[in-house]
Image (cartoon, helix red, strand yellow):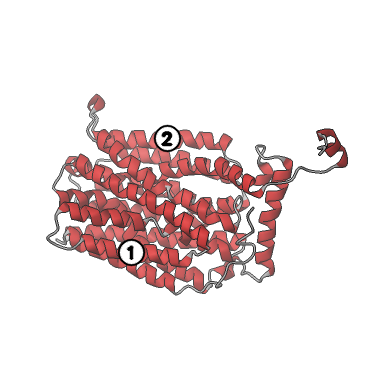
């Protein structure tokens, strides 16, 4: 068969056909690795205070209540720009907004190395929260500019995978940094300084590497830009035509409030688990600071497996809700198992590894839920609102664990409290009402 020449195609005006699967892979490989890297740095700078606590407590003589309030006040600062941050990404520029966030939070994270008093610790953590505010909901909205509903959960699983990856990597690195005393400066101070620097450098790089929308992507052909833009606009129009709510109506929707309450309950346990796990592991194992951080890293390695399995299974079945609920309920069960008294530490660590597997199983399908049923602006506001509830839970959970420990409650009692939070979150999400089957746009045919 004689194939038409390139010149004949140009003359006839015919465009080369688009391979949807190849285009999806091309977009994923260009967008996801950078976002993955950014969120690794974000979560490490947010959570490394839990690693540093093991040495800071000896140097600064802060009480458990001080650390609980300091861990938690980050989330109060984070609340301030949640909804505005999501809307800025939707209506202005993700590239410029993320660059601002990265540079400012890197500097604030490094500032924590200078604290000497509880008030200074509180101020440094609060400013870090303000600096990072809007980053996570902004990324969720940013994904709606690049991925259709069918691919969004898998993209979100790539983002969520950055959390356990960051902490699995950060735990042993932090363990090594806590041992150094370069220039007479304590290791925990070097930890904050060196782990804050990558955010500043990546903030500058983001201005050159991140692309706001398909229409701006020089790394796509004109035909690919037009095809992808048309697919995303068709999905958005379908939501508009189907009578989806306006921005403010979205905040009155039953499902929005169930999502908000569900993640509020879950993250009351989840964020506290992140910050207090190294201390709990050290207390239960009786080992050194380094041993505690290496065991903590193992927990997050299991979390990596959970994120991967969740994204694959959720996309394959098209189910989001019950994958989310299963992750929350099983996390509650395994956490409760780790609190059974009289167990050797090896068995406790086995329960905690299973907890790590399921604790990162639920977020990917959870964050796909609001983007599947709302218009772009309504989804942006709803995601910001939902994440505000998630982050207020971070304040409440950490403050409450600090209070429990300061009033004589042991690690097992705290673990049971965390398990109850996960269970309540799963029960709330189970009451969501979703269409029994995904729409045609949500499950497009694949080659």
SS class of the residue under badge 1? helix
Residue under the point 30% across and 64% down: 332
Which is more toward the observer, 57 or 429? 429
On screen, residue 415 above or below 303 = below
Residue 231 screen position, x and y as percent: 68, 55
Looking at the image, which residue sits at the far left?
A: 342
Residue 411 screen position, x and y as percent: 19, 58
Residue on which the image places disc 2: 198
On screen, residue 345 above or below 428 = above
Q: Is residue 258 left or right of residue 65?
A: right
SS class of the residue under badge 2? helix
Looking at the image, which residue sits at the far front?
A: 1
| Quadrant of image for the N terminus | top right
On screen, residue 210 above or below 82 = above
Residue on which the image places disc 1: 330
Residue 389 screen position, x and y as percent: 42, 63
The tag earlier along the polypeptide, 1 or 2, is 2
* C-alpha separation, residue under disc 1 versus residue under disc 2: 35 Å
Which dot, 1 or 2, sits closer to the camera?
A: 1
Q: Is residue 311 left or right of residue 90?
A: left
Can residue 120 be seen in the rendering of this structure?
Answer: no
Q: How many marks?
A: 2
Residue under the point 35% across and 38% down: 111
Q: Is residue 132 left or right of residue 293?
A: right
């Amino acid at each position: 068969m004689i194939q038409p020449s390139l010149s004949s195609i140009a003359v006839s005006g015919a465009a080369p056909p688009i391979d949807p699967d190849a285009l999806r892979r091309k977009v994923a490989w260009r967008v996801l690795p950078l976002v993955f890297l950014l969120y690794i740095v974000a979560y490490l700078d947010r959570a490394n205070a839990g690693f540093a606590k093991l040495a800071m407590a000896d140097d600064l003589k802060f009480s458990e209540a001080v650390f609980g309030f300091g861990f938690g006040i980050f989330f109060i600062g984070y609340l301030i720009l949640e909804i505005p941050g999501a809307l800025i990404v939707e209506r202005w520029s993700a590239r410029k907004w993320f660059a601002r966030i990265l540079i400012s939070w890197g500097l604030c994270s490094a500032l924590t190395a200078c604290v000497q008093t509880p008030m200074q610790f509180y101020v440094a953590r609060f400013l870090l929260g303000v600096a990072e505010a809007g980053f996570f909901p902004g990324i969720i909205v940013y994904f709606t500019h690049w991925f259709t509903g069918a691919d969004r959960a898998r993209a979100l699983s790539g983002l969520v995978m950055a959390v356990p990856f960051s902490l699995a990597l950060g735990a042993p690195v932090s363990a090594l940094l806590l041992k150094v005393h370069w220039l007479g400066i304590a290791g925990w101070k070097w930890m904050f300084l060196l782990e804050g620097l990558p955010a500043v450098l990546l903030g500058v790089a983001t201005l050159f590497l991140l692309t706001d929308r398909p229409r701006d992507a020089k790394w796509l052909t004109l035909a690919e830009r037009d095809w992808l833009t048309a697919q995303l606009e068709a999905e958005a129009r379908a939501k508009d035509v189907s009578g989806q709510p306006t921005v403010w109506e979205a905040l009155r929707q039953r499902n929005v409030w169930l999502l908000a309450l569900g993640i509020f309950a879950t993250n009351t346990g989840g964020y506290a688990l992140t910050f207090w796990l190294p201390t709990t592991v050290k207390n239960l194992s009786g080992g050194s600071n380094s041993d505690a951080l290496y065991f903590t890293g193992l927990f997050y390695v299991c979390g990596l497996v959970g994120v991967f399995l969740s994204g694959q299974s959720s996309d394959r079945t098209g189910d989001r809700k019950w994958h989310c609920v299963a992750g929350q309920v099983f996390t509650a069960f395994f956490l409760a198992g780790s609190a059974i008294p009289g167990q050797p530490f090896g068995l406790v660590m086995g329960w905690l590894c299973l907890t790590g597997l399921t604790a990162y199983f639920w977020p990917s399908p959870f964050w796909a839920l609001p983007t599947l049923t709302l218009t772009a602006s309504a989804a942006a506001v709803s995601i910001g609102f939902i994440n505000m509830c998630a982050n207020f839970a971070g304040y409440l959970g950490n403050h409450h664990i600090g209070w429990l420990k300061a009033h004589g409650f042991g690690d097992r009692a705290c673990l049971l409290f965390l398990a109850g939070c996960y269970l309540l979150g799963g029960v709330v999400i189970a009451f969501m009402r979703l269409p029994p089957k995904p729409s045609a746009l949500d499950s497009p045919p694949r080659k």
